Image (tube, rainbow, N blue to C red):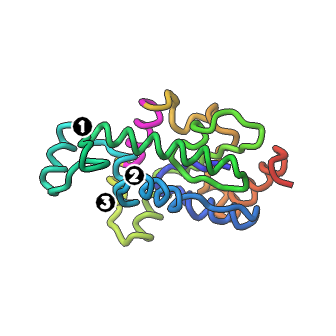
Amino acid sequence: MTISREYGAAGLAVADGVARVLGYELFSDALKARVAARLGTSPDEVDRRASSEQSLPERMLAGLGEGTAEVLSPQAPRLPDEFDEAVRREIERTIRERAERGEVVIVGRNAGVVLGPRRDLVRVFLWAPREWRVARLAATFNQTPGAALADLERIDAGRAKIAKDRYKIKWGDAHAYDVTLNVARVGIEGAVDLIVAAAHAAGVQR
């Protein structure tokens, strides 16, 4: 199962609930850690590179300012965009490898598109009205509504851009998923129940 989500739509909470009910592994932080180990970098850097919205010149200047070399090895210096591409390729490879073992809920990274059509896969997209997400983010992270809205717009725009530029899909379009849910309407527990029911109905979990 893959779960994509708008920022603030309780995606991790829902994914964790689904994984627990189905007895599946929740593959989110472990994905970043595995990719980071393979590339010799940190999970935070993987997360940043995989979702970078900066232009190439901005990233080059940022790297110089931080005093960090954009390299995969001392003998093979790489430009930031080449390193970003290496990160994304490794994420896709790791997603495919983990999916082959089955019984997993993979969160984010456009995993549903990476895996493509499969009879043993249910692809989920979670969304919620902006006001609901802003309120949830502000309460969860002790932010002002304005700061929460700014984060929401930035992160959602970045996810939509990657979906369009790399995978040629419209992020959140129902045609790219098997199940789309408004978490604000059904709640976290309701979303878990509906997704588990969809997995049973699709025959991927008995």
Task: Point out residue 26 in the picture as x, y percentages from the top left corner.
Answer: 62, 61
Judging by the rendered image, the residue that carries numbered circle 3 is: 147
Disc 3 is placed on an element classified as helix
| Residue 37 lies within the magenta run | no
At horizontal 12% and vertical 54% (from top left) the residue drawn is 65
Camera-side mark, 2 or 3: 2
Name the kind of residue labelled 1 in the image: Ser
Label 1 belongs to which residue?
Answer: 55
Identity of the amino acid at label 3? Answer: Ala
- In the rendered image, the vertical position of residue 149 relative to residue 59, given as above or below: below
Residue 80, image x and y in percent?
26, 41
Which image quadrant for residue 142?
bottom left
Quarter placement of the C terminus: bottom right
Q: Is residue 66 left or right of residue 101?
A: left
Q: Label 3 near label 2: C-beta < 8 Å?
A: no
Regarding mark 2 in the picture, which secondary structure is present there? helix
* Residue 122 in the image, given as x and y percentages of width and height: 71, 44
Q: Is residue 52 left or right of residue 13?
A: left
- Where does the magenta region start and end? 155-165
Residue at the disc numbered 2: 39
Quarter holding residue 144: bottom left
Q: Nearer the viewer, residue 74 or 119?
A: 74
Q: Earlier in the sequence, mark 1 or mark 3?
A: 1
